[in-house]
Amino acid sequence: MVAESVPVFSVANLWEMIEGRLEPLMTSRFRLRGTIQDVAVRKHLYCSLADRTLGTTSAKINSVIFATDYARIRTELAHRGLGDLTSDVEVVALGRLSTYRPGGRVSFVVEQLDYEEMRRLGQEDIDRLRATLIKEGVFDANRRRPLSEVPLNVAIVTSSAGTVQHDFTRVLARSGFAFAWQLYSAPVTGTQVADELARMLRQADAGAHDLVVLLRGGGSESELALFNTEPVVRAVVDATTPIWCAIGHAADQVLVNEVAHRALDVPQSVAAALVERVSEFLDEFKSIVSRVLDEIEMWLGSQRLIRQTLASRVIGVCHSGLTQMQVAQAEQWATLSRHGERRCRQESGDVHTITRGVRGALQLRLAYEMPQVAAFVDVSKGVGRRLEAEARAIERHRIHLAVQDPTSQLERGFAILQGSQGQWLMTMAQVLAESRVTAMLADGSVALQRPEGGRVS
């Protein structure tokens, strides 16, 4: 049941009350800061001004710019190098409130834009966000991320509708290097798309790429305001992958360029820098390989010299060993020769003694035992044959000894070493123990004197 004390108003009465309360705002001008949305141009520009706080609970108010003011504002925007009044552009508008009873609307009538205040407030927001990041110690976090020496796997974050990505990838393709890239399409105009752009940056960062590039083909100051918003700047700061930016030419630097790993002017410059980095790595790699090959060649040369020295030493040791064996063999043959000579002299003396004895006995008994002469003659012939056989054996021994005579080895280029006491020297230790050594050669002998504290020379 409705209380009888509650008043009843007509709609006209309610509008009169609303307009009465709003009269100060309807009769005086004030400034209103908001983001343009829901743009419709029908001679006049109709739109909404929304609170710049991102989210679903943003407050809105209907707005209108009448044709005359709209033409003037557009001229001033063009003169200042700013973009047109489109959705997601943040403005500080100067105007007043207006009501339209038939439509049931309260609107804000925009008469002018406060460009200096827009710039000041925008710069204040940038400075405030920069100071916060510095205080948190993350302002240069992305610049500290290590970048691969050969960043061939690249993530591209930009709008798929423009030609920016093609300008970028065309330079990579012409380089001849094995670049691979993946596009993460995201809107790059308007502050209201900051959350979507930030989401794509995080998705590219999670894609295990060597590098993420954030590209846009330039734009006005208002169009580039997106890259000063906290969601986008935070996405770059928090990325674990290095991020290079090429937002484009603008009168004022955007905050994303300050926190990114590297910032360049246009997408082609980013691509050229990537190609240059890979090319420098390859040049350095070739230089290192060349130095390694030179060092290997030097090492191989030293190894060849070492092997040659070792071979010479081995050959010398082998030659020394062979010489010692030949000296020992010569000494053995010399001993055998002396023994053979003594044996030959002894047997020759025995033969002569026997021969004289037999001949004497034959002569003494010849007169007495003539009948037995024939027998003795036969014996004498047998003895003669035996003597001839012994002589042939001795001759064979003599020839064999002559062949094995160590002095015959001297004709072949060898030498026989004798010590100071006339003994044969067969080992290096024996030679080093002597202060004076006699070397027997084919055409004579020479004395070798060892210098004080050195080897025999």
Image: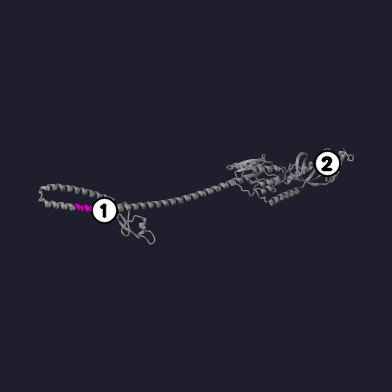
Residue farthest bottom in this picture: 452
Asked if residue 282 lies in the magenta stretch, the reply is: no
Q: Which of the image's four quarters has the N terminus? A: top right
In the image, 417 versus 298, the foreground residue is: 417
The residue at 23%/48% (across/down) is 393
Pointer 1: what residue? 339
Pointer 2: what residue? 99
Please state the horizontal and vertical placement of residue 294, each as a whole percent of the image: 50, 50
Q: Residues within 10 Å of mark 2 (few under 14, many from 20)?
A: some
Please state the horizontal and vertical placement of residue 102, each as a whole percent of the image: 84, 38
Please state the horizontal and vertical placement of residue 389, each as a whole percent of the image: 21, 47
Three-letter amino acid code at the position of disc 2? Thr
Q: Which mark is first along the chain, 1 or 2?
A: 2
Prevalent SS, magenta region: helix
Q: Is residue 375 visible?
A: yes
In the image, 420 versus 82, the foreground residue is: 420
Q: Quadrant of residue 57?
A: top right
Relative horizontal placement of residue 327, taking residue 378 as reference (left or right): right
Range drawn in magenta: 341-351
The residue at 20%/53% (across/down) is 350
Three-letter amino acid code at the position of disc 1? His
Relative horizontal placement of residue 414, taking residue 114 as reference (left or right): left
Q: Secondary structure at mark 1?
A: helix
